[in-house]
Amino acid sequence: MTIETERNRDIFLKFCFMYFLNHVLIVLGIGEEIVDMLPTEEITYKKTGNVKIFDNFFDFKALTKSGKVIIFEFKKDALRNKDLKQSFEYYTREFCKSSEDVELIMIVLSKGGRIKEYVKLDLTFHPRIIKTKKINKQEDLNLIQNKFENNKMLTFEECSLLVTLPLFELDVGEAEIVIQTCEYLKSKKHCIPEEMYDKVVVGSYLNIVEYIDEDKQKKLMEMIGMVEKAKGVLQMYGEEMKEAAKDEFKEEVREEVKEEVRDEVKEEVRDEVKEEVRDEYNREMARKLKGLHTPKEIAKLTGLDLKTIFLL
């Protein structure tokens, strides 16, 4: 699949990862739903005036529907103590920066590696560590394959497992299961709930990129209609960005109008106060002139009418 620009590719990957990580959460039984991917870059300003940009502190950072920030770390090889130390630094930096609830999930894609707690300042760091390659999902795969072969509908959980199967221990290789999934998506589309189909397809994109040789990727993406999905996602993103920009601009204009109204009100109040002060001054002057000048002369000097002068 060719995506026109690097920017579009990044946008598309953002949506793919959002769908993919939601599938991961469902399969692992974590009751959160990701609604947005957050930037992993961080900018710090030192006293010297230098600006330092920290990039790719962690693999992914996401915001959930409940308001929690989840940091995802994927480890393809053994998990070492220094990985825990580094992750602890990621976590503390995010925790100090954000007022939201923060959780770090480490997904280890290998069976090896000893895990030790990392202790600092008498605090024990407890990330959620999941070694997916030690979780055998072959039985679940057999059940899903059986459902496809018998034209039965998959559950939402099974759809998510279909996308994330390469992360787990299976009797078959990752590439083989990815190819088989693409074939099912083409020939057995009716077995996937309509509201889940696009999510499964878009989430599967990452498996194709990760596990399939480049010269074979295009064929699989065409097989599952990935090119059209990419265009649709990018168009959807464009519309969302346009609406967000409109809302932001409306808010800016609203604030500008509020300021203008405040200024107008201030001017009106100022004029009213001036008029009140001027009227009170003229009345005081008229009181002092009474007996020294005729009412008509006082009216001419103060601008007051004769009735007001007589009542003073």
Image: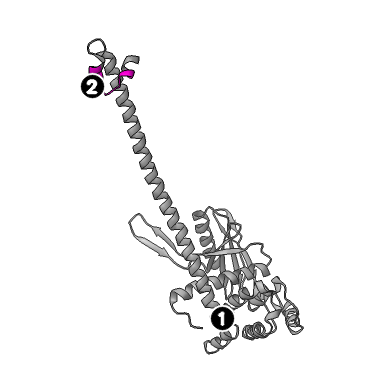
Q: Could you tell me if residue 312 is visible in this image? A: no
Q: Report x, y in % for residue 308.
A: 33, 19
Q: Position of residue 217 (x, y in %)?
A: 55, 86
Disc on the earlier residue, 2 or 1: 1
Q: Nearer the viewer, residue 249 or 76?
A: 249
Q: Which mark is residue 300?
A: 2
- From this view, report whether residue 204 is shown above or below residue 44: below
- Discs 2/1, front: 2
Above-or-below relation of 75 to 209: above
* Badge 2 amino acid: Lys
Q: Secondary structure at mark 1?
A: helix
Which stretch is magenta?
A: 296-308
The quarter holding residue 304 reads top left
Taking the spot 49% from the left edge, 72% from the top edge, the residue there is 11
Residue 248 lies within the magenta run: no
| Residue occupying the point 27% across, 17% down | 286
Which is nearer the eye, 118 or 135?
135
Residue 242 location, x and y as percent? 46, 65
Q: Secondary structure at mark 2?
A: helix
The residue that disc 1 covers is 226
Pointer 2: residues within 10 angstroms few (<14), some, or many (20+)?
few
Residue 70 placement, left or right of 46: right
Work out whether residue 179 or residue 237 is closer to the camera in this orientation and state it. Answer: 237
Q: Is residue 310 found left or right of 208 in the rendered image?
A: left
Can see residue 71? yes
